[in-house]
Image: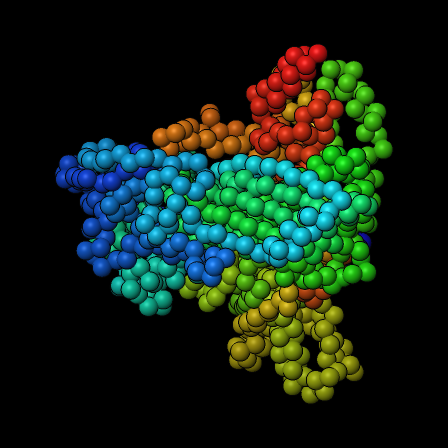
Amino acid sequence: MDSFGKSQPVKRVEDVRFLTGHGRYVDDIAPANALYGVVFRAPVAHASIDGLDVSAALAAPGVKAVLTADEIESMGVELAMAYSQVKNRDGSMGAGPIRPFLAKGKVRFVGEPVAFVVAETLVQARDAAELIEFDYTDLPVKVDPVPGGETLHDEAPDNVVFDWGMGDEAATDAAFAEAAHTVKLKIEDNRVIANSMEPRGAYAEWENDRLHVCFGGQGVWGLKGELAAAFHLDPSAIRVTNPDVGGGFGMKGFTYPEYFMVAAAAKKLGQPVRWMSERTEAMLTDNAGRDLVSEAELAFDAEYRITAYRIRSVSNIGAYNSGFAQFIQTQLFSRVLTGVYDLQTVWMQCTGVFTNTTQVDAYRGAGRPEAIFALERIVDYAARELGVDPWEMRRKNFIPSARFPYATATGETYDVGDFHRVLASAEKHSDRAGLAARKAESAKQGKLRGQGLCYYIESILGNPSETAEVEFQEDGTVLIYVGTQSNGQGHETVFAKFLSDQTGIPLEAIRVVQGDSDRIATGGGTGGSRSVTTQNSATLATVGKMIAGFSGFLAEELGADPEKVSFDDERFRVDGSNETPTMLEVAEMARAKGRHDLLKVQETATLPGRSFPNGAHVAEVEIDPETGVVVVDRYTVVDDFGNLINPMLAEGQVHGGVAQGIGQAIQERVVYDAEGQLLTATFMDYGMPRADTMPMIAFSTEPVPSTANVLGMKGCGEAGTVGALAAVANAVLDAVWERGIRQIDMPFTPHRVWSVLNEQDSQRIAAE
């Protein structure tokens, strides 16, 4: 594509607003007369509530209300929050206990909401919350995600949330019995906190019995439906909005208790109510990510082709079911269970367990990073154990290009792929040929160097349908209404630029409208890397409808045959006429003629199937045995994202995803003590990645256009995280393999790595 063509790396138009402090986030736009809410939270992880005295808080200066579970129910508001359930192996549904948005009878994790204090100022609300008398009786605390222990919910004996399976267990067992080689590995996927730059927040206001809730989220329609159910309102009586949102990563894709609290308090008091999370509060209560332990096994024939894959995992759900928690490590994990390998005999079994910890739900990738991490770890480990080059092991087992479309063992259909080409490109760009020289140079300095490969594939999830509406304004500007929601990904740029490319409307004349249930009737929100693929497909359909309408109008005005009118992405042209109006000019002609029906056009598009971005991540790490410090020294990504709309934004998404993956692999880890207290509740204790721990990331693409959408696109929002975990982990294992170390788990903190290296040295010395 030449430098003046389409799909160019256009700089983000919204960044000037953000970087100059002109972003409009929840805390910036709350009504001036809004009262302040503070949540009184459980100080213990598991206890029965014996008494809750809020009288002193109610009498405190400036306090307008203190809401409790009893008060909420007396208002006729439903306490129970919604969530989805999977089916167990026996056909029954996964456990479905009530999750109240204010605790009732018991508290089950530190930070669970118990009461909501509303006052004229934030300081007054905080002071009043400290006056609440909370009497409780401690109950045994369960933090380890294994079945058994003190029962958290009567609906879940032994705390088992679900027992889910997929595949052919008998055939898989038979394949293992007949295998020439088998390999087994225990794999821990550590819990992490999303830590979005902007914590969660919301405000609510009622006008004429109509509710408006504004919150920082990833879409408005899910919360709208839940509010309608909780307050027994017709959905038309509710407006939900998302303003600018400072990061979501899946964590903000679900409803939270505070959104119901501000709505209930505003209803009770007849005045707007606002709430904003503080950082430690967020770390205590935001949905966490990952947190599962798997036992993965591979069976091989004599030529090292994989004949069967068996994986059993136990996943921590937390104290309650969150919105989509039961699906993450079950159905979403299974979407890419077999990765890029020609493998049809599989068995996957997952047990979910309730614990006295914060809920676990979607975090960038939602099940797919967990699945690829487990698979690529065991494939790499097996190659080393069996004496096969890890790159050749993958090539030997890739799905051949001639086999696409390819039906996987778990019911997915990969439409296209050329994994050999992508891997060959990664081998070149990562300078694999120079690895031996780099290892030797590291060894001279007393360092260990390792290289790790991960070949990932991702399944694009979420609603396959989306709607776009384009409206021509009197001032010559154009609005495009979208059903997705930007959390910092650059939607305002990519959606406006795509419309500009298809219509010739200047980019600066287009404004993206999002996150308002009154202005946009339906939408799927943002999640599962769906936004660009679904939204631009809808925009393309809308543009087609616009062109048809304007062409017919021009034909009428010029007395021409409609078939003689064409549009070349910039101007309309009419055979036999010198008229070449732009789309904006035709819109003004239509306005002058009173054809307002042509000035607001809407269309919906539904994708016929998922797209499957894939690619190779190659990480190189250097380890200092004296300190255990792991440095990611080089990082190379070659992706197949199909056709790119904006390469710069795609690369930025990969960089962000890789950073989150490296963060989890090297530093991040949530730690609870035996009493269920969160020990990593500040940035002093939780190891967030920093700029000086990130390598330069080399990025390139080898596109194989998808056939699942007319634009040939594949989503890219989560791909960086999906590939990064195993690439870094495999690099660390490669670095220590010659030391005889076969097992080491994330995060690869200095203390953990130093301890493993020294333990191995001690064992070697003792043996000698």
Most foreground residue, 135 or 174: 174
Q: How many marks?
A: 0
Instruction: Indicate the quadrant containing the C terminus: top left, top right, bottom left or bottom right.
Output: top right
The residue that appears at 72% across and 61% down in the rendered structure is 406
Most foreground residue, 673 or 477: 673
Residue sticking out furthest to the right? 433
Say if 495 sits above or below 594 in the image.
Answer: above
Q: Position of residue 643 (x, y in %)?
A: 73, 57
Instruction: Indicate the quadrant containing the N terminus: top left, top right, bottom left or bottom right.
Output: bottom right
Residue 182 quadrant:
top right
Residue 77 quadrant:
bottom left
Residue 136 quadrant:
top left
Say if 470 sits above or below 174 in the image.
Answer: below
Q: Position of residue 702 (x, y in %)?
A: 78, 50
Q: Is residue 304 visible?
A: yes
Most foreground residue, 437 or 16: 437
The residue that appears at 54% across and 39% down in the rendered structure is 293
Q: Position of residue 398 (x, y in %)?
A: 77, 51
Say if 575 sits above or below 660 in the image.
Answer: below
Name the colouring of the figure. Answer: rainbow
> Does 377 sit left or right of 438 as displayed?
left
> Does 439 sit left or right of 766 as displayed?
right
The residue that appears at 67% across and 65% down in the rendered structure is 709
Q: Position of residue 187 (x, y in %)?
A: 59, 37
The residue that appears at 73% across and 84% down in the rendered structure is 563
Q: Is residue 116 visible?
A: no
